[in-house]
Amino acid sequence: MTSGCVITRAVLLVTLATAVLSGPAAAEQNSLAVARELYASARYDEALEVLNSLRPGPGPSSDLKSIEQYRSLCLLALGRGDEAEAAIAAVIAADPLFQPTEAEASPRVRAAFAEVRQRQLPDIARARYATAKATFDRKDLPAAERQFRDLLRLVDDPDMGGRLGDLRLLVQGFLDLSVAAAAPPEPAREEAAPPESSRQPDFPPGYIFSGGEGGVVPPTPVKQEVPRVPSSIVRQTRERGLLELIIDEQGRVVGIELKSRLHPLFDSQLMVAAKDWRYRPARLNGKPVKYRKLVQITVDR
């Protein structure tokens, strides 16, 4: 090792020691700076040692993206492509919408990011849909709206290449429902209260509930048999569809709208079958009410 390298290494060691004495946050920032210097000096193995010693904490202030980006740079420079992809995947898992700019990474690294994103984004989108749907089912409508909006941006990302069109319809539908159900009521007019005998109910007659109203118990299936897809068209049928049903106070299906289609032949069979479905009706304060219900149809292949 030349004297210049020895001096440089000594300076780096002093920098790391100073960072440790300054506290965890300062240590992480200084160690990352040391790793950048080592990478700039083409000392990729040593830069990896520093990066591997860093343990960024959770949250938006974490340097995870910077650490894994420099890790991928070092690994690509060392010809360790599989490990570089794993580092890139860690960045994308933490922030699926992140893409390095021209100032942050070389064309080679940006191309590697794009390739890994194209593979990962569909699975990430499906997982985030499950999370947003669970939030919606818990009636946490403001959080569900935020999650569905973020998911819509992810599904529309250019690296998605137009895939998951069916999922986009579901996301948009649930986003619309979240916004509508979370809308604040109109401010009350300042007027004298009418006599007790002339007061109107909270909801007008024939009002169709959708689950966002407080105190409503959704309908539960009594008969909801989905027909099998004919084997002759199963490969041409989309994996998921979405039905919107209007269920009356007797638990009968009185309205059907196909929000997301599967196949023209199967769609007609599904609509006919849905007319015979029966439910225990939705209830408000123990009284049966009309209800708008979304039913997701999944095709077994």
Image (cartoon, rainbow, N blue to C red):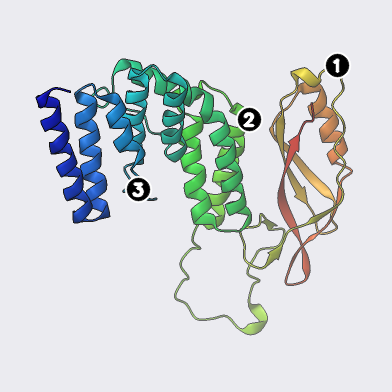
**Mark 3 highlights which residue?**
60
Rounded to the nearest whole Å, what is the CA distance between mark 1 and mark 2?
22 Å
- Give the image location of residue 140, x and y in percent: 55, 58
Which structural element holds mark 2? Answer: helix
Which structural element holds mark 1? Answer: loop
Asked if residue 66 shows in the view, the reply is no
Horizontal side of residue 112 vs 220, given as left or right: left
Taking depth in this image into account, of 240 and 113 the one nearest to the observer is: 113
Identify the residue shown where x is 56% and y is 29%: 122
Horizontal side of residue 186 vs 209, given as left or right: left
- Give the image location of residue 189, x and y in percent: 46, 71
* In this view, 204 is above or below 301: below
* In this view, 129 is above or below 164: below
Which structural element holds mark 3? Answer: loop
- Give the image location of residue 9, x and y in percent: 17, 33
Q: Nearer the viewer, mark 1 or mark 3?
A: 3
Residue kind at label 2, given as amino acid type: Asp
**Mark 1 highlights which residue?**
232
The numbered mark at residue 166 is 2
Rounded to the nearest whole Å, what is the CA distance between mark 3 and mark 2?
31 Å
